Image (cartoon, rainbow, N blue to C red):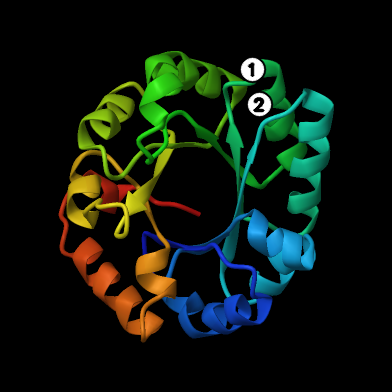
Amino acid sequence: MNSKLVVAVDVFDCNFALDLAREIGKEVFAIKVNWPLLMARGSSIVSELGQYTRVICDLKIADIPNTNRLIAGRVAEEGAWGVISHSFTGEDSLRAVVEAAGDTKVFSVVAMSHPGSSEFIYPSTDALIGLSIKAGAYGLIAPGNDYSMLSRIRSRTRDQVLMTPGIGAQGGSPEEALKHGADLLIVGRAIYNAEKPIEAVREFNAAISSFKGQAENKQLS
C-alpha cells in the first residue's frame, strides 16, 4: 500500500493496539507508538506491532548522549523503522541518537503542533533545523496544523522527510499539509477512536491520494 498515513496509537491497551495493527497495517505507512504503550508492555511492543506494519517510536528522546544511545539502540534492536528525538538538547545528543539508531530512521523535532510550541520551540526552529541536518537526521517533525510554519520548515530543508502531527483532531487538513510540504501525515484520535478505524484510514488515504504535488513524488523506503 502506497500510503503516506502514520497512525498514532496513544493508548495503554496493548491488545487494542495489536488488533488495530492487524486491521489497518496493510493500508498505512506506519503505526506510531508513544510512551503509554511502551510503559504498558515494554519495548517488545515494537516488534509485536512490526509484524503488521512499520513502527515509529515517538519517544522524543531528550537526554545526554549516553542515555540517548541506550534508548535509540534498544528500539533499533526491536526493529523500529523510525524513532523521534528532540533536538534542543544539542548536536552531540542528537548525533548520539543517529549513530545508535543504525538503519532506523531518526526524525528530529523542530516544531510541535500544540499552542505551547510557540513559547520556546518556534523561536529556535531555524537553529534546530540546521542542527538536525548537521547531526544527520533522516527527517524532521513539523506541525501539520500550522501551514505557515510548515512551509517555512520545508523551505529550509534539503532532502529531509517532513512528518507532520496535528492532522485531524488538532485541526490540520491532509490536503493543506501536503500542499505546504509534508511527506508523511500523522493521525491519531480521528482513527483509533473511530467506530470503524479501517474506514477512517481509507477516508484519509483517499484525501491524501487526491493531492497532486511534491509529496507524491518522494519515494520513502
Where disc 2 sits, the SS reads helix
**Residue at 35%, 47% in the rendered image:** 183
Residue 146 visible: yes
| Residue positioned 24% across, 46% down in the render | 177
Q: Percent from the top left, x then y, of residue 118?
A: 36, 25
Between residues 71 and 179, which one lies in front from this camera angle?
A: 71
Instruction: Rate crowding at label 1 as few (under 14), some (14 to 19) or many (20 or more) other CA atoms within 10 Å.
Output: some
Work out whether 193 lies above or below 161.
Answer: below
The answer for how far apart the CA atoms under marks 2 and 1 are is: 5 Å
Disc number placed over residue 121 in the picture, else none: none
- Eyeballing the image, is 67 above or below 41? above
Proximity of marks 2 and 1: CB atoms separated by less than 8 Å: yes
Residue 103 coordinates in the image, percent (x, y): 68, 46
Q: Can you identify the residue that label 1 sits on?
A: 91
The x and y percentages for residue 37 are 67, 64
Q: Hey, what amino acid is under mark 2?
A: Leu
Q: Can residue 2 be seen in this view?
A: no
Q: Name the residue under label 2.
A: 94
Label 1 amino acid?
A: Glu
The residue located at (24%, 56%) in the rendering is 174
| Side of 154 relative to 38 (left or right) | left
Please name the residue shown 25% across and 74% down the image. 203
